[in-house]
Amino acid sequence: MKIFQQQAEYNYSWEEVSTSNWQKYGPWNEKTPHVIAVDTLSRTIDPQTRILRTERLITCKQSAPKWVNTLLGGHETSMVYETSYVDLKAKKVTMCSMNMTCADLINVRETCIYQPASSSPDARTLFQQRAEITALCGGWQKIKNSIEQFTVERFQQNAVRGKEGFEMVLERAREVFAEQRELLQLKQDSRILQQAGM
Amino acid sequence: MSASLAPECTEVKERYDNCFLKWYSEKFLRGTATTDECEPLFKQYEKCLSKALKDRGIDKMLTEARDDNRENDAEHMQPKR
C-alpha cells in the first residue's frame, strides 16, 4: 500500500468553497476535462445531526498509459463512487471516494476535508487530502509496486491541476454572485425611483 | 454544471443541480432549510438515471461500493464537536 497526502489553503471562505465544491467539475473548470459526468445518486439530511449526505458517481475518461491499461483491463471510462458529508455546525465537508472500475485489481480510497483555516477562519479554507492505494493483482510484487507508484504520481500531478481548476471555479462563482447582487440592487433602485414618481 | 453519464438525463439533471445549488447556498448554509424543495426535480432525475444505471449494469457495481462504504457512513454521520 502507498499513501498520498497533501494539504492546501484557498483564499475563499468555507461557505464559498463548500458551495463551489458542487460545481468543481463543471464547465468553469478547464483543468479537469477527464471528468465527463457527475451524477447524484442520493441526497439526505440526517434529522438528528442535520448532516447533509450526498452520494455521487463520477465518470472519468481513462487517460492511463498503455502499460497500465493493459494490466488493468483497458476500460475506456472509469467510475468513482463518492459520499460526502456536510456538517454545518462543525463547518466541515468530508468527501470519501473509492474506485468502482478495476476494483478487483486496485483499491484507491481517498478522503478530502474542507474546513475553515485556523489562520483566518472567516476568509480562508483548509483542504486536506489523503489517499490509500493498494494494488491487489496477484503475482509479482514488482508489478504491484509499479501500479501503486504510477497512481501516487497521478495523484501528485492532479493535486496541482485540481487546485488550479478549483480556483477558476471559485473566482467565477464570486464574479457571478457579485453580478447578481448588482442586478438585484439595480432592480430595487428602479422600483424606488418608480414609486417616488420619478 | 457537469453532464450526466446518460445523455438523456442531462437536461433534468441540470434543472435539479441548479435548484440544489440555490437551496444549498440560500437555505442550507444559513441553517434555515426545513425541507428540500428540490425533491420533486430529484425524483424525475433519479427515475431517468436509475434506468440508465440498470441498462449499463452499473447498478450491481454500486451495490458493492455501497457495501464497502459502510465504515465511512458510520464515521462521518456522527457529529464531532
Image (spheres, rainbow, N blue to C red):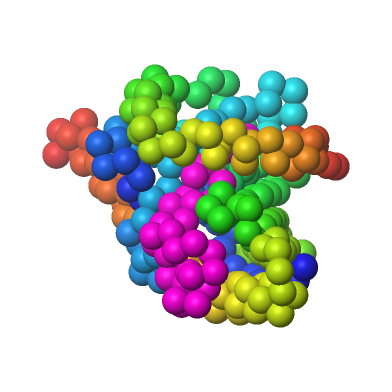
Q: Quadrant of residue A77?
A: bottom left
Whether residue B54 appears in magenta in the rendering, the answer is no
Where residue A133 appears, as percent x and y from the top left, is: 70, 65
Where residue A2 appears, as percent x and y from the top left, is: 75, 71
Quadrant of the image containing the C terminus of chain B? top right
Residue toward you, B7 or B57 = B57
Q: Can residue A80 be seen in this view?
A: yes
Q: Give me the residue at 38% from left, 38% from top.
A: B56
Q: In this view, does A187 lie to the left or right of A95?
A: left
Q: In this view, does B78 lie to the left or right of A181?
A: right
Q: Give me the residue at 17% from left, 34% from top.
A: A194
Residue toward you, B22 or A36 = A36
Q: How many marks?
A: 0
Q: Quadrant of residue A154?
A: bottom right
Q: Given the current orientation, which residue lies at the most extreme front position?
A: A139
Q: Give me the residue at 41% from left, 30% from top.
A: B54
Q: Give the range drawn in magenta.
A: A52-81
Q: Is residue A150 left or right of residue A172?
A: right
Where residue A168 appears, as percent x and y from the top left, is: 42, 68
Q: Give me the residue at 55% from left, 37% from top.
A: B62
Q: In this view, does B4 lie above or below A118?
A: above
Q: Is residue A184 above or below residue A115?
A: above
Q: Given the current orientation, which residue lies at the most extreme left position?
A: A198
Q: Given the current orientation, which residue lies at the most extreme right position?
A: B81
Q: Is residue A11 above or below residue A100?
A: below
Q: Can residue A174 be seen in this view?
A: no
Residue toward you, A91 or A102 = A102
